Image (spheres, rainbow, N blue to C red):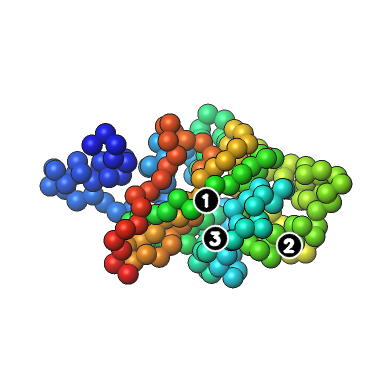
Amino acid sequence: MAHLRPLLRLAVVLAALGTPAAAQDATNWLRQEIGLPTELHVSEMWHPRGGQLYATDPLTLWATGDAALSVPDAPARLIGLLERTQGRAALMALIWSNAPVACGYDLTTIGVDTGLAGFLTPSDVRAVDAYADPSSGPYHGTYAAQLDAAVPTIPFIAELPSGARFPVSGSGWGDGGYPVVSLHDAQGNMVALYTQFIAGTDDWLLPEPCTDLAG
């Protein structure tokens, strides 16, 4: 029992009491399961057109030569969970649906070298690459004024003069590798995608893996 994840432990306890566990949408699931006090920050809608994105450091474009992640080709709400001590981002998420969370997948790791993390479509990556001036270094040129205004933490939609728009967030308390995780409903539809920067326990927040979906 000690090795079961918190949500599964809760379901077992409630079942033993004869009370069904209440299903939660992605936002409430994230707030409950992260394991530390947080404030919810709700940002704009963003549409990953083409249904593909990279979870990457938006100033270094780490690993954007690899395969992109498949996501819903539909508008999503950008949210952040901010830890209450210093108001830094503990988590950034895209929410496509209010359907109850059933399971999920640990998809990849985002490598952060500049204190920033972002979700960019392949066309956004090309736009950043074309706009950036490598000779000026990663902290200058590329939407630097916007980053200065939003530092250190709150997820927001960065915009380039070309019209490219993509979510960016401060990466909590430092650089490193952070998990990128999808959440799914009982039919197997992706309802959310998140990357976590600060953990409330010794472990990252990972859902029960999807094994037996209705769809």
Question: For residue 2, which quarter of the picture?
Answer: top left
User: Label 1's element?
Assistant: strand
Amino acid at circle 3: Leu
Between 26 and 108, the one lying in front of the other is 108
Amino acid at circle 2: Arg
Q: Earlier in the sequence, mark 2 or mark 3?
A: 3
| Residue 108 tag number | 1
Regarding residue 145, the answer to whether it shows in the image is no
Regarding residue 144, the answer to whether it shows in the image is yes
Image position of 194 (left or right of 24): right
User: Label 2: which residue?
Assistant: 126
User: Label 3: which residue?
Assistant: 69
Q: What is the spatial separation of the Cα atoms under label 1 and label 3, in whole angstroms?
A: 9 Å
Badge 3 crowding class, 10 Å Cα cut-off, few under 14, some 14 to 19, many 20 or more, is some
User: Label 3's element?
Assistant: strand
Question: For residue 45, which quarter of the picture?
Answer: bottom right
x and y, in percent, of residue 188 in the image = 37, 64
Between 149 and 54, the one lying in front of the other is 54
| Residue 83 tag number | none
x and y, in percent, of residue 14 in the image = 19, 44
Image position of 195 (left or right of 98): right
